[in-house]
Amino acid sequence: MKLNYSLQCGEQQESSPAVILIHGMFGSLSNLGVLARSLSSDYRVISVDLRNHGDSPHEPLMDLPSMAADIVELMDDLNLSSAILIDHSLGGKVAMQVALNSPERVTNLVVIDIAPVTYGARQDAALNGLNLLAQNTIENRRDADALISELIAEPSVRAFLLKNLARTPEGDFRLKLNMASINQNYASTLVSAPAGTPYVGPALFLKGEHSAYIQEKHRPIIQQLFPHSEVEVVADTAHWLHAEKPETVNALIRAFIATKTATKP
């Protein structure tokens, strides 16, 4: 599948290492924009829309191997033999699957607040809110916000979800998300764990201190599948640590990439 993507880099970075940023569930390529803008001063940064998200094609099949294959296909189309993968949440699972399936394509792996485990359905409220938006005619964003406010109390979460609305030629708003596919796969393939041959390249897992997505009990499976991995905890953050403390997260990522790339044979 041909994913939608954007490329950011300075003229002097055209031959620099490539970084691919992969967003999480219900997101789009703009979600990691803070990281993209920072890293683009030294790297070619490719931000992608996963299938059924943003401006990428819609497809009923939505599992980790298929989404990982989409990333490899994009790399092929861009003539990238390998890249640094930086990703959040569901995007982290996709990137882990790429590393486990095609380790030669991954120079460094950075996973933001997700573990290689099967989770229960954790985003029911967000899913229900999006389904409500899909079932109604949305005239403006204020009405959309009011519509889902009883399901989702946090204004920041509502604002994140409403980024998926796009104006139609008729003047109303529709979701860019493929809700039919997401609903079909939400409680099965999308919460499943990546699997494959252990990735022996350098990997960094960043955990939000107050997030439950990476727990102490997950460390053995992280070490099993990613034996050269490190886990760093970012203090006073939750699941969206890259938005809560962008300077800290960016510094950790830059230090990791620089050190591990410099020491590779």
Image (cartoon, rainbow, N blue to C red):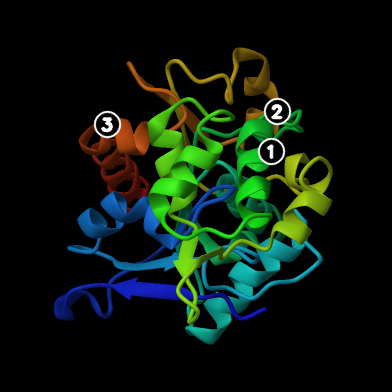
Residues tagged 2 and 1 counted as in contact (Cβ below 8 A): yes
For the residues marked 3 and 2, what is the alpha-carbon distance in whole angstroms? 27 Å
Q: Name the residue under label 3.
A: 245
Q: Which residue does the image show at 27% across and 65% down from the upper left?
A: 43
Q: Left or right? Give the position of 144 relative to 196.
A: left
Of pointers 1 and 3, the one earlier in the residue sequence: 1
For the residues marked 1 and 3, what is the alpha-carbon distance in whole angstroms? 28 Å
- The amino acid pointed to by label 1 is Leu
Please determine whether, in this image, residue 232 is positioned above or below residue 103.
above
Residues tagged 3 and 2 counted as in contact (Cβ below 8 A): no
For the residues marked 2 and 1, what is the alpha-carbon distance in whole angstroms? 6 Å
Residue 27 location in percent, x, y? 51, 52
Residue 221 badge: 2
Residue 69 location in percent, x, y? 69, 69
Q: Left or right? Give the position of 34 relative to 184.
A: left
Residue 141 location in percent, x, y? 41, 53
Residues tagged 1 and 3 counted as in contact (Cβ below 8 A): no
Sort mark 3 into few (<14), some (14-19) or many (20+) by Cα contacts within 10 Å: some
- The amino acid pointed to by label 2 is Ile
Quick check: can you spot residue 102?
yes
Q: Nearer the viewer, residue 243 or 194?
A: 243
Residue 225 badge: 1
Residue 215 location in percent, x, y? 60, 17
Q: Which of 259 and 122 is in front in this view?
A: 122
Numbered disc 1: secondary structure: helix
- The amino acid pointed to by label 3 is Lys
Residue 214 badge: none
Sort mark 2 into few (<14), some (14-19) or many (20+) by Cα contacts within 10 Å: few
